[in-house]
Image (cartoon, grey):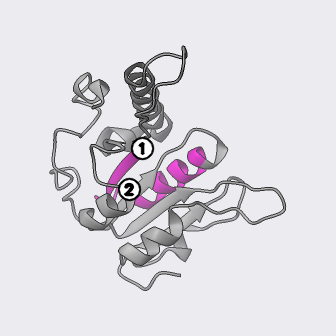
Amino acid sequence: MCPVTDLDPGLLTSKRSIESDAVRSAGKRVVVLYEPGRTGSAALSLAGRLVGGDGSALTVVTVAPQDTRICCGAGSAIDYNRAVCEASAAELRQARELLGFAGNRASFKLLVQGKDPPLAAWIAAGGFGVVLLPARRRPLRSAKHPAADPLRRSTSAKVRVVDAGSSFEESRIGDPRAATA
């Protein structure tokens, strides 16, 4: 259990359905997985530009991994899980600030591992048209995200991995009902 989800109900939507009024607006539905760093900021920036002022819905999600192990003398799993949830909630507040005006209309969701559905299942159930993931750089390999392939298999949404500094254009996403590339 993540006690943080009860602290700020105005920010986190863990108590609300993903089919909230903010998500049911006209236009395409965009979800972005926020992870701190340059690529997370780039994914948020692109999401903000995609939804613009046209009434499209934006949902920002972050995942709080949980641990059940108790290490010798390193503290309890409960304390660790609480700290991870607090850090994840802080990341969502940071995402709201980075989005600027678009953050006022966006929905924010903290998914707690073991309590909430896995990311791919949650996104598939949400009926999103566009999914933006921050790229993760690996030495001598292309930038990818480990959730990209499972999401492409579980949803009909366009799934894009956004790298900081790439020349990614919104026009490449196009119609969210179109086939995934």
Which amino acid type is shown beneath numbered disc 2?
Leu
Residue 137 in the image: state x and y as whole percent.
72, 54
- At horizontal 57% and vertical 46% (from top left) the residue drawn is 40
Disc 2 designates what residue? 119
The residue segment tinted magenta is: 40-63
Residue 2 colored magenta?
A: no
Contact (Cβ within 8 Å) of mark 2 with mark 1? yes
Mark 1 Cα within 10 Å, few/some/many (few <14, many 20+)? many
Kind of element beneath mark 1: strand
Give the spatial CA distance, label 2 vs label 1.
Answer: 8 Å
- The percent coordinates of residue 124 (x first, y second) are 31, 67
Does residue 54 appear left or right of residue 181 in this picture? Answer: left
Q: Which mark is residue 63?
A: 1
- Whether the magenta-drawn stretch holds residue 57 is answered as yes
Q: Amino acid at mark 1?
A: Val
Whole-percent x and y of residue 53?
35, 55
Vertical arrangement, residue 61 with respect to residue 140, above or below: above
In front: 2, or 57?
A: 2
